[in-house]
Amino acid sequence: MKKKFNITGNCYAEKHYMMDNSAKIAKVYELVEEGQYFAINRPRQYGKTTTLFAIEEKLFRSEEYMPIRLNFQGIDSKWYDSDQIFAEMFANKIADYLEYHSKEACELIQNFRKEYEIDLDNLSKLITKLVHFSPKKLVLLIDEVDASSNYMPFLSFLGMLRTKYLARETPQDYTFHSVVLVGVHDVKSLKFKIRNPEEAQFNSPWNIAIDFEANMEFSAKEIAPMLQQYSEAEKVQMDIEAISNKLYEYTSGYPFLVSRLCQIITEKMLPQKEDQTTWELADLEKALQTIQNEVNTNFESLIKNLENHQDLYDLVFAILINGQSFMFNMDNATIRKGVVYGVFKQNGKLKIHNQIYAQRIYNYLISNIEVNQENDFYDSENQFLLPNQSLNFKRVLQRFQAYMKENFATKDQHFWEKQWRLIFLAFLRPILNGKGYDFREVEISDEKRLDVVITYGKFKYIVELKIWRGQDYHERGLAQLGNYLERQNINIGYLVIFDLRRETIWKEDQIDFEGKEIFAVWV
């Protein structure tokens, strides 16, 4: 069977090109061997289920362990009506699994159910009997635990596992050797939405679990073997090291994004190339533009989480649009929420997880301004083109300044401070008109400046957006912009300054700064 790059469901080595997850599997297996109870909490499409299947397979191959893998997704809500009903469902699921892996153990469950009515107490006894019966150590693996986390019976079930864990050295409470829960949320810290909130157990029934700190992202070195497999199987030539590094640079190793970019190249781009035997970095750049314009469940989930959580939306806005800098701190509830949903990456400073997400969110924020504008930005997109098909960017800024004066001079200060950057970015979109694109520079200075790099055809323009904070800051900003232009080997830069001093607003200036030409407008 011909392998493919996969972005839906579980990945199988015999069917799909896969990144090297051996280090991740080894870490999970190590914790299982230690008899740990833990949860693997990562965002959607992060390779959690694939990891769980791999662990199950490795445990089956061992002489020491017997895995029991369950999935709580799609369970009817009626199973959460009471502790007893939940216990019956859990016993059913274990029996269904063991029917295909240990008929003797399955029969033990059926015989037990004939003798006892299944409730949590008897479920506890059943687990102990299974442990005594099994010649191997039982390892419980539960996927999609989020589906159960809003229900009190699930908490009671975890409480039962905790009680048995604490007494597991006594024969009457023998229990699972290890328990692994997999989901998006951390079971230890969820605010459970139960019918009677006063019943919530603030002393988490899962406080016996250790933190799972293994890195589930894929490094460039872990991406490379997947490309090597593909290259050898399909006889396609590529610079594996360079492309692996670029894939990591764009995605920060987010599994879905890596696989999707590869899928776009193999399924959409290579068939249309004259030379279908080579992957080039240029192909990856085109795939990057393609993924930014497509609709998929991953991006839908990303945007939905921003729309459903105003605090997260505001924090992302402050980082991407206002150029503010924050230290990463998991004790902050909003930051922790952003990590859970894959918006932020754990780092010294708070950053959007990857460049693709940053650009996607950036486009979304700009679109919110575009669709809410009542006035047209300008009459013709061609009015800014020069004969050599470059942009007259000085004229672009002058027209933007005029547009702001015409439409926003009477807006209050709060509106100005929050929206002016977004309005500028929205103003650019019709000018670029699919022939170019804009992206923000990753590094932000301590004076809240936002650097935007604009490409149009073969031309590049560097624009700095900043708030006026006095002459000293202005001089420092010119030096920073000059240094950046030097690194980019560009001689002309542009500066848009938001200035609340009404007596100096709406002016422009042509600045010669250490051999660099900088055109500035004040709005």
Image: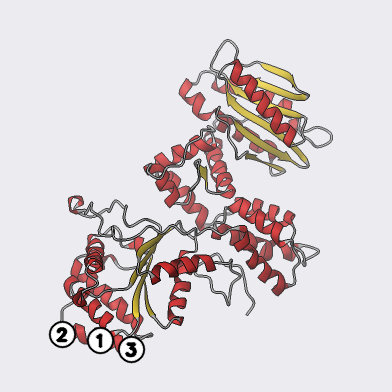
Residues under labels 1 and 3: Cα distance?
9 Å
Question: 138 or 263: which is nearer to us?
Answer: 138
Classify residue 31 as left or right of residue 151: right
Question: 155 or 305: which is nearer to us?
Answer: 155
Residue 115's disc is 2
- Residue denoted by label 3: 103
Residue 257 location (% of width, % of height): 57, 57
Relative to residue 309, is residue 506 depicted above or below?
above
Residue 382 location (% of width, % of height): 74, 34
Q: Quadrant of residue 423?
A: top right
Residue 447 location (% of width, % of height): 55, 27
- Label 2 Cα crowd, 10 Å radius (few <14 / some 14-19 / many 20+): few
**Element marked by disc 3:** helix
Classify residue 348 as left or right of residue 135: right
For badge 1, the amino acid type reads: Leu
For badge 2, the amino acid type reads: Glu
Instruction: Answer whether residue 523 is visible to the viewer in this image.
Output: no
Location of the C terminus by quadrant is top right
Q: Earlier in the sequence, mark 2 or mark 3?
A: 3
